[in-house]
Each structure stands twice: as structure tokens, then as C-alpha cells.
Amino acid sequence: MKVTCRGAAREVTGSCHLLEVGQKVAMLDCGLFQGHRAESNRKNIELPAPIEDIDAIVLSHAHIDHSGRLPYLIRRGYERRIWTTPATRDLCAFMLADSAHIQQKDAEYLAKHHRGFIEPLYDQADVEKTLELIHTVPYGQPFEPVPGIEASFLDAGHILGSAIMVLDCREGRTKRRLVYTGDLGRSNQPIIRDPQVPERADHVMLESTYGNRTHPKSEDMRKELAAIVRATAGRGGRVLIPAFAVGRTQEIVYDLHLLLQRKEIPELPIYVDSPLAIDVTGVFIAHREVFDQTEPMVRQGGHLFDFPLVRYTRDVQESKALNTLTAPAIIIAASGMAESGRILHHLVYGAPEPRNTILIVGFQAEHTLGRRIVERRPTLRILGDEVPLRAEVQVLNGYSAHADRDEMLRWLAATTRAARRRPRVTLVHGEADVQDDFTAHLRQLGYATTSPASGESVIV
């Protein structure tokens, strides 16, 4: 029994791992690589394994860096089942369609501006075929993706529907339990429940995005958010928030709703300028059964994401009109790393204005526009133009949906207590320097830990 890492190996995009048990292969996630266009395209078109060798796919959650290459596999001939949770399937219906649309628009843009042509990985027909192959399983219900693996999902507490995979592997008389966290969430997040702990684990594949740092508390983040909104509104500016359509947008809207109820921010319009985020918010509303019922606003049962000052803009002309606003406002738009979507147009108009604030509320991978904003580069290249960055830049890492170092250690310690012994740990989904720091820390605590490169295998 072994796992081969084919993505998110000493990097944070393209999650994909091949679990081999006996003669069967189960693929754990199949995400899109993001970053430099040429490098990402080269990685994305390379199949993680020959299609005929993949017996099943198990999907942890809907984020594109975990699900985004599934339709490409279907285009290349994959016809077997994809296993995931009901909420993840519903989110994928919108997210994969949006990914196909963005690829098509990027190809058209490059061709129009004579910058070569990159064929989209897949189209809407491939997305529809992907959805037909998805088989949903609720949390806690056992299923068998392939002979030799009995699996179940635990709530990962990352985004709606996100799952920790508990994989009981059997090869002859040998039995091993592999636990793959996907992306491990945080405790005490609004809306989403806390990550669950498996009863035991022989081997844990642990994400490590924030393995060398800690986040501020959620309540501290709300206070900082309120201060940023007040300061920006006071100087007559707009708060521009690049936000992932799944999870981050809903969390920010939830917190703004709460701050307005508490009268901690002025009453100013809040625009959610993302058709995808609007569709995703509808999925959230449809899956209240997995909300955290300890949250007061959740228990009240009212409209979490629909209140008088929030406005959802689907129409392109409505979106363009936001760039002519003269009064203070908050604009939330995808994508979360500012690599595509409507946020790019808002940054073209908003980044040169000193009264505005660009608020970063999530992890920004290397080589993305979001990372260059965090680095406060004096000039940003956006949609082919050089745009001066004069707006204030604020970063609230506490809004990350990823567990920080201490939260991962607490989760791992709880898993260890349940198992009554330390599992082996394989780190994935983390940048190399972060994984090196985290590996050293885990080894000091007595965990046998590795962080394989792409193509390397570990024995379960």
C-alpha cells in the first residue's frame, strides 16, 4: 500500500494523490495548478496517471485547487465514479462550470491580443459529464470506492461540504488506516462546524499551508475588519476584497452583517460582485443542515446573507457601474488570489486611488497577483496594463479557512490520543520552506514526518 503525490507536493495548488491498494488505484482529489500561466498549463495537461489505471476518485471538497482537473480527466476518457459529499457535489456544479468559462475567456483573450493560444482543458459538456459521475455520501456513512478500501467522510471544517477522508486499507492480511485531511479547517469559524477527529489513524496526510504560523482569533479579525471599514469610509474610499466565491465571501458577508447589527461599522452598501459567489451562496442556504448550530445568528434561523445593505450583482453592466461609485462602499469579488474574474477590473480602477483599501483575506500563492499585492509592488500588471498601486493594502490572515500551526497540532494530538499512539505524518499542500519548518517541529514532538516532492511515494 502506498501513496504517490502528483500535486500539492511542496506547493499549495494542484492537490492530487494516488492511493494504491493491491491492484487498485484510488485518486484522492484532482485539483488545478494555479500560478504562472505557462508553468500551470504544462502541469495541468499532464495526466496524474493513465486513465485506465484510475479505478475511482475521492474528492475532499470543491475548491478548484482540489477539484479543478476532474473534467479534464473525463475529457480524456475517465468514466468511473467520483465520491464526495452532497454539498461538495452541489458546489462543484457551479465552480467547475465557472472554471470552464474562465478558461474559454482566457483563450479568447490571448488569441485576440496575438499572444498565442492555450486550448481550454475542458468545456461545459465535460463538466456536465463530470457531475453525472459524482456519487454523494453523507458524513459518517461508510462506502467502498474500490475493493480493499473502506472509506468514510468526517467534517473537515474548511468550507461547506469539505471532508476528511478516513481510508481503511486492506491488502492480504495487512490493514492500515490512512487519514487524508484535504484542507483542514479552523475551530470557531462562523457558519462552518469545527473539524472532526478520527477515532484512530496509522498514517495522516496532513495539509500544511500555515504550518509555520498562527492566526489571530476570529473575534480579533472582526475588530480589525471594522476598523478598516471605518477608516476607509472616513476618507471617502472603497474597500476592495478579492475573495474566494466559496466560503470566504459568505464568511465576510456574515461578519459584516454581524458588525452592522452591533453598529460597529457605518451603514454603507456592500456589493457581492460575483455570479459564482451568488450561486454558491444559494448552495449554502440549501445546506443549512451542516451549519454550526452553536452560532447565535445560525440558531436564529434568519437570513444570514440577505439584509438591506447587501446587494448581489450578476449583470456585467451593474458590475462596471461599481467603478464609477463616488461614495464609500465595500466590493467583494472573485477570485480569491486576484488571478481572474471581476476583481481584476475593480483593481484596475481602484488600485491607483489612495483613498481605497485593498483588503486581502486569504492565502496568496506564489506568482499570483494577490501575492504581488501583499508584497506591495509599486506597479501591478493587470489585464495587460501596468497599474500603479497607491491604495492602502491590508492583510487579515485570520480569515483563512486553513488551520494554523497550533490548530493542526491540536487536531493531530487529538487524533493521537484517540489512536493511543502517534501516526506517521506526510505533509502535503504547503510551500517548501513552510513544510521544512513544520517537519522539524513535528519531529521534535516525536512524529515520523515526511514531505514528499511531486512524483514521490510514501508507504502507508
Image (cartoon, grey):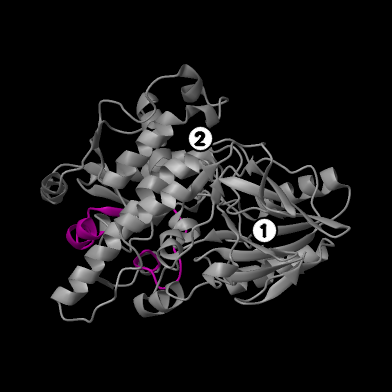
Between 192 and 61, the residue placed more toward the observer is 61
The type of residue carrying mark 2 is Pro
Question: Which of the two discs, 1 and 2, sits closer to the camera?
Answer: 1
Tell me if residue 283 comes above or below residue 435 in the rendering: above
- Numbered circle sitting on residue 338: none
Residue at 47% x, 31% y is 287
On the question of residue 359 being in view, the answer is no
Q: Answer few, some or many: residues within 10 Å of disc 1's Cα (few below 14, many 20 plus, some between 14 and 19).
A: many
Q: Secondary structure at mark 1?
A: strand
**Residue 131 falls inside the magenta stretch:** no
Q: Which residue is mark 2?
A: 190
Instruction: From the viewer's perspective, tell me whether residue 242 is left or right of residue 449.
Output: left
Q: Quadrant of residue 266?
A: top left
Q: Which residue is mark 1?
A: 206
Q: Secondary structure at mark 2?
A: loop
Between 220 and 420, the residue placed more toward the observer is 420
On the question of residue 120 being in view, the answer is yes
Q: Answer few, some or many: residues within 10 Å of disc 2's Cα (few below 14, many 20 plus, some between 14 and 19).
A: many
The type of residue carrying mark 1 is Leu
Q: Position of residue 380 (x, y in %)?
A: 27, 71
Q: Which residues are magenta?
A: 344-371
Q: Quadrant of residue 209?
A: bottom right
Residue at 74% x, 51% y is 412
Q: CA distance from mark 1 to mark 2?
A: 23 Å
